[in-house]
Each structure stands twice: as C-alpha cells, then as structure tokens.
Image (spheres, helix red, strand yellow):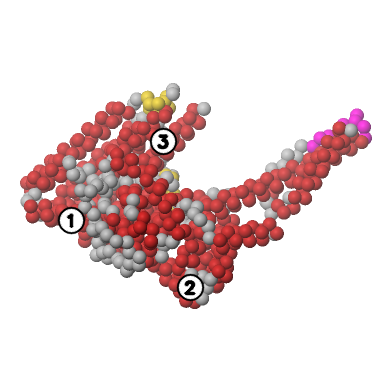
Amino acid sequence: MNRTWNRLLASLFAAVLATSATARGQAVDDEDEPDQPVQQLNGFVLNDATFGQLAFGVQDLGSVRARMDSYLTLKVEDVDRACALTAGQKQKLKLAGRGDIKRTWDRVEEKKRKYVNMTHDQNKLNEIAQDLQSLRVVLNGDPFVDGTFFSKALKSTLTDEQIARYDKSVMDKKAYRYRAKVDLVVATLDQTAGFTAKQREQLLDLILHETKPPKQFGPYDYQVVMIQLSKIAEDKLKPIFDDIQWAMLRRRFDQSRAMEAILIKNNVLPGPEDAAVLPAQPAPRADPPAVRRTFDGK
Amino acid sequence: MMRISTPLAICSAACAVVASTVVSAQVTKTEVRTKTTTEEPNPKRPAAVREAVKTEAVLRQQMVPAIGLRQGAMNKAALAQQVTQQLRPFLRVEYHFIRKVCEPSPEQRGQIARAGERALRETAAQYPNGNLNAAQVIVMGRNGMATQSFNDPIKPIRDGLAKAVEQFLTPEQAARYKDEVKRKNEHWKQVAVRTIVTRLDQDLLLTADQRAAIGDSLRDHWNETWASSVTALVNIEHYFPPIPDEHIMPSLDAAQKDIWQALQVNRRLVRFGIGANRLDDGPEDQELTEARQAEDKAGSKE
C-alpha cells in the first residue's frame, strides 16, 4: 500500500513538475530520480531536495545560490564589455546585485518556511507548485531585470552614453533570443502542418512584425510567442495557409490560449508599452516576397 | 446427457476457434501460454462417459493454445493499430506537403497515398510491442561523453513517400519536392543552431561576436543528433545536447569558461519521444482514406 502511494505521489509530483515548465511533458529523466516527497498520514512532507526540485527543477539549493552569484559576475562583465565601466561603477553594480540575490533568497527562505518539513494535503501539490512558479521564473530568466536594485544602479551609476551603449547591446540580445524562439515556434508548426519554404518565411515575417518579445525571457518564451501568434488578426494570418493547414493550426492556437492566465500571473506577456522587434505591418499580403531577417547577421 | 452435451458444446466451440485461428499461425510459440492439466479417466464411470471426459480433456488441450493464439494475434493487431494511429498524423502532414509542393494529378495522388500507407504500416510493424518508446532519441550530457541512439520512426515514412515521388511523379515535380525538403532541412539546422546559441547565451551572457562565432562553429560541425526533434529543442531549457566543448570553449572568456565547466555537472540522460501527441489528427485527404481502405482490404484478404 505504501509503495503504491509513493508511486502515485511520485507520479503526481513528476506531473506537476512537467506541467509547471515549458512544454516538457515528454521528457523522461533516466539518471537521477528526484527524492520523493515523504508520505505522512493523509499528506506528504517536502524536504529541502524536493522543495528545490519543485521550485527550481534541481535538488541542490546551494547550486541555485551559487549559480545566481556567478551570474552576477557575468552580468557585471557583460555591462563592462558594452560600456567600459570604472572600478567604482563595477563595485556599485556588484553591491546592488548582491542585494537582489539576498532579496530573492529571502523569498526562497520564506517559501521554505511555509512548505518544508510541514505536512501538506495530498491534493495541494499542484497549488504549491503554482505558488513556487515565480521563483522558477527568477532563476531561469535574468534575476537582474527592471525593478531590481541592479537595474536601478545601472541607471544611477552609468553615464548617458554608457546607458545608450548598454541598451543597444541588450536590444541586440533580445532580438536574437526572440528570433530564436519565433524560429522554434515556426518549426514546431511546420511539423504540424507541413509548410513550404515560402510559407515559413511569410509566417516568420508576420510574427516578427506583429508580436513582441516577453517582458522577461525565461521558461515561458515559447508560449509567449504562441499566444501572441494566436491573436494575430485572421485576415493577416489565414491567407498564408491552405484550408487543411489552417484547420490544424487553429486547433494549436486555441490550445495555446490555455496558458494565458499563467503567463499573465508571471508577468511575462508584453504590453502596449513594450517594444516590438520589428514595426507592425498594416495590410495583409496576398503574395509577399520571401524575406529573410538578419538580426544575427546571418 | 448433460455430461455428454457439455463436451460437445466445447468441441464445437473449439473447432470454431481452431478454424478461425489458422490465420494466426505467425504468432510465435513464446506468446502462447497453455494450461495442460488433463483429467484422468475414472474407471468407475460408464465407458461412454469416460470416453466423453477423455474427449473433453483432449479438446481442452487443443482449445487453450488456440485461444492463446487468437488472443496473441488480437493483441498484436491492437498494438499495431495503436502505433499506426500514433504515426498517421505524420503521414497526413507529409502527404499534404507533397500535394502542396508537387501538385500531383488525381492518379498520382492515389499512387503516393497508397505508397505512404504501405510505408506507415511497414513502420508500425517494426514496433510489435506497440511502444514507440523503442524509437526514442537519447540525449546525453553536455560534454558528449556518452553515446546516443537515434531511431526516428518518421524517417521510413518520409523515405517511402520520397521513393514514391521519384517513382510516380515527373522529374520536374520530383525536383521541386527535393528542393523543398532541402530547404526544410536547412531551416531546421538554422533553428537548431540559434536555439542552442540562445540557450548558451542565457547562461553565459555572450557578446554578439561570441554568438556568431559559436553559431558558425556549430553550423560547420553540425551533428543532427544534437537537435533530433522539436521536442528536444523545446526542452533545451532543461536538457542541453551533448555538444563537444571544442565547439564552444574557444569562444568563451575566462569567467564564462569557469561557469560553463561548473555547469557540466548538471548532466542528464533524457529520452524524448517523437512528439506524436503534439500533432493534431487533422482532416484527412480523400486519397489517404482510400489508400487506408485499400490496404485494409488487401490485409484482410491475406
């Protein structure tokens, strides 16, 4: 009975993990089975490892902290490469970054106090996973985005010229990353509907003109593209495809909308204030020329 | 009378079963589990009854393996059906792609559809346990230490259709198809390289020059197992393909190298399915329906 319960709980645990991240339903990890939540009467208890697995996808919380520290080092170097920082500026940025790490880690500790070594109702696992999702976004994305001490220190420490240089480098990076995600979405849909090269180019071009990068990059980038794509006006989108393709794609678009609430909750969907990669195109194109975008110079 | 009628009823049932399982002769012996208990004749019983009991025992011995054979065949058919259903959406997509690119005549469409249906069934037959996991793609850790298994169940279907394109379409139509497939493969490689570089950028904050240099290195030394499926790329957040360090490290600075090496500990052995559940079972072209029915008919005759 105990074994059966443990298996059920482990399956549920795995399912929650699978659905809490980017479309990873088919991944099966053969190597290290995560520690399973310990069964108690009418509930389960999370330990540090299972909490780490649920919050960050790794069992060792120390490695999460170490990763944030090393990311700060890289972040300061990244700014330095773009703007040639003085020693004093570097010091200020590092200090601000350490403040962000501490703040994030305080949140982790708070959640640990709430969940670790406590008995939870067996039906609450999904709810807990949802509550911890915001931590996962911080770790998998950039922990020093707008609103952090680091970003404020950038604005107050750098000269206008340095800021302009850094903004350009950030925009290039954003454009590259977003283009990669858009490419991946197009490739996925290609597998669903069998596009010609011309259709791929038209769809890619349309998405890049009509959608925006996520507010912050992270585990939901793919869904951010899909949801925006599903909302592009039909008179712009439909003419690219034939009827059979359109029928298949519409289903995919409808399915993608199921994620919208989660994306809103995690504040990753771009709003009117966010910049697009390319300006929107006003009219539908019945037979547009093949266009290849060259964000990365390729 | 009851004692005699029971074995008779069993006899007729067994005959029916035996007759109907002739077609199941290909089922291997290992799949058949028989119960071979026999009833010893009781000398106190009348001769007719003893004979009837003996007959029943013999028939029971014949019948049990026959039922086993039948169930084995039914299971096999059900499993083949299961795999066929999983793979069918891929056939639809590939067939529709050919229709779109080559604009075949109705007669050509029928020929391509029939070839595709055959390829689908032959592929499904390669998974007799009904489990496409046998075709899973193995993706290992970042340092490329481990070997990989790459067995794409969609490939034989594509190959079957490509062969049919060569066989039944004009050279001009076949050339168009080849060109589109080539461009599709190039696009896939481009998508994969960008996705991998983006993933590295996420961890290592690369400069534009570093992104370009690593991208070039990956393109120049491309290994298709690094991005074997859409699923593998969608999951790259969590599982990085086993790309040898020589294509990445030379472009990194000292701090990035340290972090990259530290990240090596997060090696994973991950299996990705073919992504069949990500395909919708969309509308089917008429020729495909006809081809399926024709193959069903041919199969039932055999």
B227 lies above or below A57: below
Instruction: Provide the residue designation for mark 2.
Output: B174
* Spot occupied by residue B128 in the image (x, y as percentages of width and height): 59, 52
Residue displayed at 40% across by 48% down: A254
Highlighted range, magenta? B38-47
Please identify the quadrant where the N terminus of chain B is shown.
Answer: top right
Nearer the camera: disc 2 or disc 3: 2
Please indicate whether residue B298 sits to the left or right of residue A253 in the image: right
Give yes or no for contact between labels 2 and 3 (Cβ–Cβ under 8 Å). Answer: no
Q: Determine whether the residue tagged by mark 2 lies in a helix, strand or loop.
A: helix
Instruction: Provide the residue designation for mark 3.
Output: A13
Do marks 1 and 3 share a chain? yes
Nearer-the-camera pick, A243 or B50: A243
Do marks 2 and 3 share a chain? no
Residue displayed at 15% across by 48% down: A76
Please indicate whether residue A156 sits to the left or right of residue B247 in the image: left
Nearer the camera: disc 2 or disc 1: 2
Residue at mark 2 to residue at mark 3: CA–CA distance: 50 Å
Give yes or no for contact between labels 1 and 3 (Cβ–Cβ under 8 Å). Answer: no
